[in-house]
Amino acid sequence: MNTLSVSGLNEQIKSLLETSFNQVLVEGELSRITFHNSGHIYFTLKDNSSVLSAVMFRGNASRLKFRLEEGMKVIINAAITLYKPRGSYQINCFSIEPAGQGALSLAYEQLKEKLSNAGYFAQERKKQLPKFPKKIAFITSATGAALQDMLRVANSRYRALEIDVYDVLVQGNGAAYAISNAIDVADSREYDFIVIGRGGGSLEDLWAFNEEIVANTIFKAQTPIVSAVGHEIDWMISDFVADLRAPTPSAAMEMTLPDTNELYQTLDALQTQMSHLLQTKIQTKLQELTHVKKSFAQHSVEKKLQYKQDEIKQLKEVFAQSMDFKLQNFAKELKSIEIRFPEIIQSNLNLAQNQLSNLEKMLKSNNPKFKTKKGFAQLSLNSQVIDIESLNIDDIFEAQSDRVVVQAKVISKENIV
């Protein structure tokens, strides 16, 4: 028996394994997944009792439609290989499918959840489309039926519109990148909105509109985006991210463009309404003008002057009546006075004579010559008439009657209570 080196033995084992197990299908659960910077993916495939090391190199990993996640059950198409430096064998994965679920369906759900959590579907970020667009862009296949449907509906509804068509792949390899690039170009050219879409097909046919690169481009676009992909039952990732989702390409035109016939009817209705409003307004203003004229006539200078003249005339009449009344009363009073005047004069003369007679009597009664003088004399001191209370002891005073003057001296003085 020949002695083998470790490397030689590993080489024989590697050749045997890779020849015997050049393609196998293995089902298991993913664990310990590592996404290397090189683009390779390393992980472990396990079941209840065993584990296998696995690698998926960058070329095969780039074709995965979904992201590998811890605990995911998968079916792997692979080959057995030996890593000679460590003497360990592993499976080299060519493709991976989710167990019990299609790869595209899983990728769709994974991306939908990722973008939803990132706010791509938020209603508040969606942009409003103009009601009367002037210029729009179609991003679709120039040979597809979807383009013809959109042009037909657009021409029948609203011809006052400029439409630019960006011819792109809408399925297969490179379709997602072509759609994304076309959106970027159209977004820089100031369209009122952009429509991306195509007709119906299988999930694989429509998959370009589920790619993350398309979703990112729609999300970053400044121009409103309308997603119109497939049939009404088809919901693409682009539908959730776009500012408006249309169930079909033709429905996109019906939802975004005004109907010219409806506009004509609306204009007719507005014209009728405007005419009615104008007539009503004119009638109202005429009534207001009539009211203003009447009010002006009532408050005009001529009207005010006439009012003042009437007021002066009325005041004159009242004054004349008042003066006539006063003159009549005065004439009556004057006549009464003329009748009573002699009596009043005689009465006043009699009263004056009586008063004069009374005064004469009072004068006579107060005249010292006519008064009884017995026992009374006028006192004077130093030629000044004084009261007896003014005299003091030893004062020399004079007491004078109508016939005699006596000079006397105060010997004593006593107050009589």
Image (cartoon, helix red, strand yellow):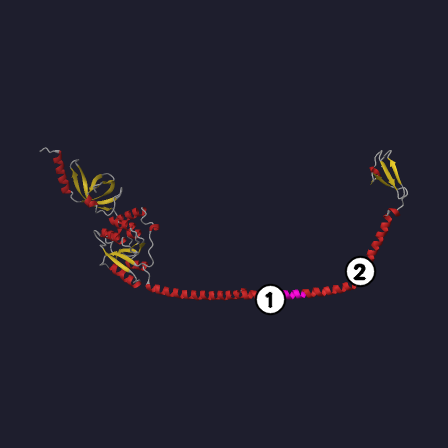
Alpha carbon distance from label 2 to label 1: 49 Å
* Whole-percent x, y for residue 258 in the image: 33, 61
Disc on the earlier residue, 2 or 1 = 1
Q: Is residue 311 on the magenta stretch? A: yes
Q: Is residue 314 on the magenta stretch? A: yes
Question: Would you say residue 228 is visible in this rendering?
Answer: no
Examine the image and state in which quarter residue 32 appears.
Answer: top left
- Label 2 crowd (10 A; few <14 / some 14-19 / many >=20): few
Residue most extreme to the right: 374
- Front one among 325 and 403: 403
Specify the amino acid type for callout 1: Asp
* Whole-percent x, y for residue 242 in the image: 30, 52
Residue named by callout 1: 310
Specify whether 130 is left or right of 391. left
Q: What stretch is highlighted in magenta?
A: 308-321
Where 247 sits versus 298, above or below?
Answer: above
Specify whether 190 is left or right of 410. left
- What is the secondary structure assignment of the residue under circle 1? helix
Residue named by callout 2: 345
* Whole-percent x, y for residue 253 in the image: 30, 59
Residue at the image point whose x is 61% and y is 65% from the top:
312
- Front one among 326 and 352: 352
* Whole-percent x, y for residue 107 in the image: 26, 48
- Front one among 169 and 74: 169
